[in-house]
Image (tube, helix red, strand yellow):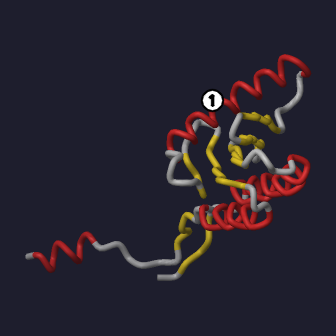
Amino acid sequence: MWTLIERLTKVAKRAAPAVRLPEAEVTAELRTLRARIPQLTGTLVASADGLLIAQDLPGSVEPSGMAAVTATGLSLAHRIAQTAHGGAFHEVVIRGVDGYVVIYAAGPTASLTVLAGPAVNVGRLHLESRPTARAIAAHLAGPRTTNHRT
């Protein structure tokens, strides 16, 4: 009887589109960014609604909580930019006692958050992080399906 049930419930293996999630590419971008700027202490990519996409954070920072807070900051910064200038949001810089938190728009639906120590060269941080945010946006907006034969 189990053989009959297994035969009836098995789906024929065909070439079907499989969902390709870009987490590996995004994580690679984060690691490359951290290698280029030694003063970085962490990086995070979150969706606009606060879902964690990828992270390379220190153990002291809870990734899901940081993703949610980042989304809130992104939403507020976007609203401020629209109210003040009517334009789109690009980045926000937060300078604290122990360093910087910079949030970059990574396309219309995500953000790149970069944590850096107080000695970081902010100009270099922007020079390296802006292209990374654009690359992440491209990974997230790219084609989501690939054909696999199984």
Q: Single out the residue that lies furthest toward the top.
A: 83
Q: Position of residue 106 (x, y in %)?
A: 75, 47
Query: What residue appears at the point 63 percent right and 29 percent down from the top-left corner?
Result: 72
Helix, strand or loop at label 1? It is helix
Eyeballing the image, is 149 above or below 63?
below
Q: Single out the residue that lies furthest toward the bottom.
A: 150
Nearer to the camera, 63 or 9: 63
| Badge count | 1
Nearer to the camera, 129 or 21: 129
Residue 144 relative to residue 139: left or right:
left
Quarter of the view holding residue 9: bottom left
Residue under label 1: 72
Query: What residue appears at the point 85 percent right and 57 percent down from the top-left corner?
Result: 128
Eyeballing the image, is 90 above or below 117?
above
Quarter of the view holding residue 76: top right
Query: What residue appears at the point 68 percent right and 44 percent down from the top-left corner?
Result: 110
